Amino acid sequence: MPRQTRRRSYDQYCAAARALDAVGDRWTLLVVRELLAGPRRYTDLHADLPGVSTDVLASRLKDMERDGLATRRKLPPPSAATVYELTVRGRQLLPVLTALAGWGAPELAERRPTDAVRAHWFAIPLVRALAGPGDRSGVVEVRLDEGVFHVRLGGGGPDYGDGPATRPDACLTLDADTCVALGRGELTLADGVRTGQITVEGDTAFLGVMSTSVPSGGTGSAGGG
């Protein structure tokens, strides 16, 4: 019988310690962050986790499969690509990432020259900011200079995803600093629209703001498929 490598553990009968046994290794929660956006290929994960080695990423994905946090499946033809996706238990880490992002938000006061950035990294705090105090439901496409992502309010699938939405109910155009301010609660959506820091298009009534789109301008990637 082949010898099994003993899993590293804090060996403490404590819920927090047990959780850290599964997700406390470097890069694991950032892999979760990427997979919360939906199924991803290994190459996509590696591209959006700058700094991780191929060996470490492969090891983390293997650990996540072992711990029941992620699964691997092959897409049907013509793609036939293999993707990783979170299990139900893995998706239950969204509130953990949301709380962690809220706690770490003050550290975004200044962007370091060495900082990598991807547009969808702003999604987790923004989901909470756009959800607001009411029961909002809809798909919002968010356009930054750094890229485009979308968030889904009110359930019904992944809470956010990289790239344009297929049929967004509303589109927001803003810069990264404004997005950070929204996520940190330093700016409301209504105030951002009123001051011109945020442009909104589409059916924005569910967000509690009026559209500021220019009818003749077009929206590019906002169209549905």
Image: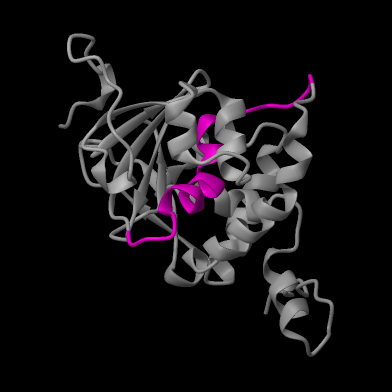
The reply to whether the magenta stretch includes residue 131 is yes
**Toward which corner of the image does residue 65 lie, by quadrant?**
bottom right
Q: In this view, does 75 lie to the left or right of 33?
A: left
The reply to whether the magenta stretch includes residue 142 is no
Q: Where is residue 17 in the image (x, y as percent from the top left)?
A: 78, 78
In the rendered view, tell whether residue 10 sits above or below residue 50: below
In the rendered view, tell whether residue 23 sits above or below residue 38: below
Q: Position of residue 149 (x, y in %)?
A: 42, 34
Q: Give whichever of 42, 110 is nearer the camera.
A: 110
In the rendered view, tell whether residue 162 sits above or below residue 116: below
Q: Is residue 11 left or right of residue 19?
A: right
Q: State which region is magenta.
A: 113-135
Q: Which residue is drawn at 27% across and 38% down?
A: 204
Q: Where is residue 188 in the image (x, y as percent from the top left)?
A: 51, 41
**Toward which corner of the image does residue 135 lie, by quadrant?**
bottom left
Quarter occupied by the C terminus = top left
Q: Which residue is drawn at 29% across and 41% down?
A: 80
Q: Residue furthest bottom?
A: 13
Judge whether residue 36 can be spotted in this image: no
In the rendered view, tell whether residue 128 sits above or below residue 53: below
Q: Position of residue 217 (x, y in %)?
A: 23, 10
